Amino acid sequence: MTLDYEQAVAHLTGLGRFGIKAGLERTRAILDELGHPERGLRGALVAGTNGKGSTAAFLEAILRAGGLRVGTLPSPHLRSYNERVQVDGVPIAEAEFARAVSELLPRLEPVSARLGQATEFELLIALALQYLGRRVDRLVAEVGMGGRLDATNVLDLGVAVITNVALDHTQYLGDTVELIAAEKAGVIKTGNTVVTGAEGAPLEIIAAVAAQRDATLWRLGRELRMEARWLGWAGSELSLDGPGFSHNGLHVPLIGSYQAANAALAVAAAHALGVDSAEAIADTRWPGRFEICGDHPRVILDGGHNPAGLGALLGDVRRLVPGAGLVVVFAAMADKDLSAMLGLLRGAAPDAVVFTAAASAGDRAADPEAMARAYGAGQALLPAATALETARGLAGPAGTVLACGSLYLVGELRG
């Protein structure tokens, strides 16, 4: 059976009905059927609660500047599904994607008969590795959720990055940061170089796992000594010293003050992979993360989708936009800690909040009217484009609109 692009995407997304199936047995079995295209790949497996995508983007920019062809697995996509498989920042062509799915499906039948139907993410990872394995010099793979049982954890790329650990996906990963840290530390393989920005109890757990697996551990604030100066709308300036390398005055173009730490982890990971073209972080682009997409009023889009990410975002926005003139468009997934996120919105004290939902989020989206009631103010509007236009009117030409809470929302509004 030969599928076109729309049919191929529909087939993969239709597997969402099989939900999340923890474990690597099925992914390993699929890769065995494919002849293990992942073997021999080097690069970095990037885990963490927040900052995975930004760290991967910084790392890709450095590796490409070092003359390497780089594959990436951004998750989720913003506008088009084929964004999830990229070579040198260019998504797989729609025709190639359709051909890859068509070729893969018949080879899944023995695995499905033994182990049950693969999930969407398992199939996507297998497809990506089959496509990228013969095309790239290095792979930067973003973990989907957790780490230990995530389909990407079939990979041993030599470097494991764990950006940070906070509460998210608690229904799957555990309801304490210690439990979540143990899941994320599961990406560490024997002999890896582990680069992390984690702190406190999660860092202790990561360090213990690294020691058990004879992995080299580079910790931000210890082996990695960072000095950063936030430049507001201009990003940050970063200096970093680590084992065998030193860089001064690097420009971090992404606006959030927290992006300097993500860039530092990427610089260290690149060094572990033998590339020191750290200046290339200045060329990094990562859509949908503190991205300015309009003027008069200024429009900021950001996919901060959990309390830790949203709190960091709102802190920076309030430093840049103090006082009046801030209107928020907010959407979230129903399985998030909505109470905590709404509390952070109240603390930021915007002039107004317009609650909405992204159409692409489907039944997983939190109900806008229920969020407005829980918030105690604001209005609920659909579709998201109407919510944005209403917020622009409320902010006025001199104001700022922040659309946040969900990458699904960001992807829809960017269009």
Image: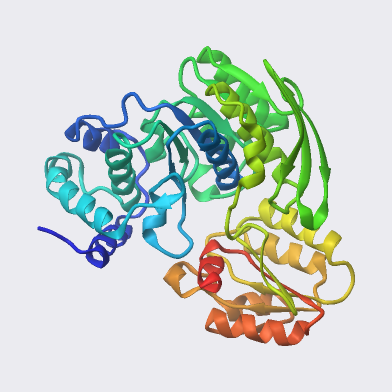
Does residue 286 appear in this view? yes
Q: Residue at x 16, y 44 (%)?
A: 108
Residue at (34%, 52%) from the top-left corner? 92
Which corner quadrant of the image does residue 316 belong to?
bottom right
In this view, 394 is above or below 317: below
- How has the structure been colored for display? rainbow
Please provide percent x and percent y for residue 357. 54, 75
Q: Report the residue at 42% width, 26% height from top.
A: 42
x, y (%) of residue 287? Answer: 57, 58
Quadrant including the N terminus: bottom left
* Image position, residue 288 (x, y; %): 59, 60
Task: Please tell me which residue lies in front, 371 or 88.
Answer: 88
Q: Is any atom of residue 381 visible in this view?
A: no
Q: Specify whether 26 is left or right of 62.
A: left
Residue 72 versus residue 354: which sits nearer the camera? 72
State how many labels appear. 0
Residue at the limit of the structure toward the top, as seen here: 214
342 to the left or right of 22: right
Q: Would you place residue 236 above or below residue 199 in this image?
A: below
| Furthest-left residue in this view | 1
| 108 lies above or below 335 | above
Give percent across and percent down for residue 30: 22, 38
Relative side of 294 to 44, left or right? right
Q: Farthest residue toward the right?
A: 323
In the shown orientation, is residue 55 left or right of residue 220? left
